[in-house]
Image (cartoon, rainbow, N blue to C red):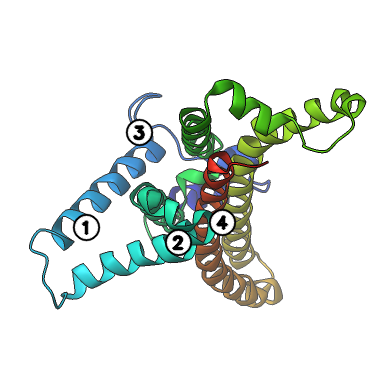
Amino acid sequence: MSGQLVVAQDLPWPPSVGDFYPPDVAGPWVTKFSIMIWIAVALLIIFFVAAYRKPKLVPGKGQWAAEAVYGLVRDNIAREQMGNAGIRFAPYLTVLFSFILLTNIFSIVPGLQISPNSHIAFPIVLAAISYVMYNYVGVRKHGLGKYLKQSLILPGVPWPMHFLLIPIEFLQNFVVRPVTLALRLFANMFAGHLLLLVFTVGGFVMLGSSSVFVQATSVFSFAMAIVMAFFEALVAVLQAYVFVTLSANYIGTSLADEH
């Protein structure tokens, strides 16, 4: 975003949505977003390997932090949504939560200042992984026929109503779920960072004005940018929690014996 600010000051018009995305680093396959994804993966691997390299009965700071993250996901997400059956999914959900949280936090890290999840491609991939996961475990437990029956047919409903309800259930369980899972994460991170961009660029534009009064009011724009940065941090945590909670809920629904 820092590079965008310099450009925005030289333009006579406000920044557009196109200015929101950083330019490619080395062609379309090496972008700022892809580099940040690899940084996030590397940091998480280093963190968890270092934390559990020499586990102790009385954990150190690193081990305590890793156990705190795992315990939060295991007890407050996996068990809450799936009961004791959710414990076996806790490692996957912990990695998913940690990855989304870290990439969301990138939006307020100086030098990065944007989250990969503000680009729709990355939330789509994350939602697709959860989509494959909960459908796979459902089919594996119940079989394809029974799984589809449980997902599409509501018990105790008069049979003529199924002509209306089956398409609705199909859209809800197999189309709406992954789409809303991706869009919710994308929209929140995109909107939050767009607000940061508007207030920051607006502050620089007002600061460069010929009017002393407008220059003075730029202080309020910069102050709002700082406030929005803290708000963005809160949104980053909440969206990671919501995404993982919904993923756990969908897996739990797939494993349930009843609709």
Where the C terminus falls, by quadrant? top right
**Along the line of sight, the residue nearer the viewer: 8 or 37:** 37
User: Residue drawn 64% across and 36% down?
Assistant: 179
Q: Tag on residue 242? A: 4
To which residue does mark 1 refer? 47
Between the residue at mark 1 and the residue at mark 4, the CA separation in whole angstroms equals 23 Å
Q: Which element is circle 1 on?
A: helix
Of pointers 1 and 3, the one earlier in the residue sequence: 3
To which residue does mark 3 refer? 25
Of pointers 3 and 2, the one earlier in the residue sequence: 3
Instruction: Tell me which amino acid carries mark 1.
Output: Phe
Q: Tag on residue 108? A: 2
Of pointers 3 and 4, the one earlier in the residue sequence: 3
User: Residue drawn 72% across and 30% down?
Assistant: 152
Between the residue at mark 1 and the residue at mark 3, the CA separation in whole angstroms equals 27 Å
Between the residue at mark 3 and the residue at mark 2, the CA separation in whole angstroms equals 20 Å
Q: Which element is circle 4 on?
A: helix
Where does residue 222 sit, x and y in percent of width and height? 57, 71
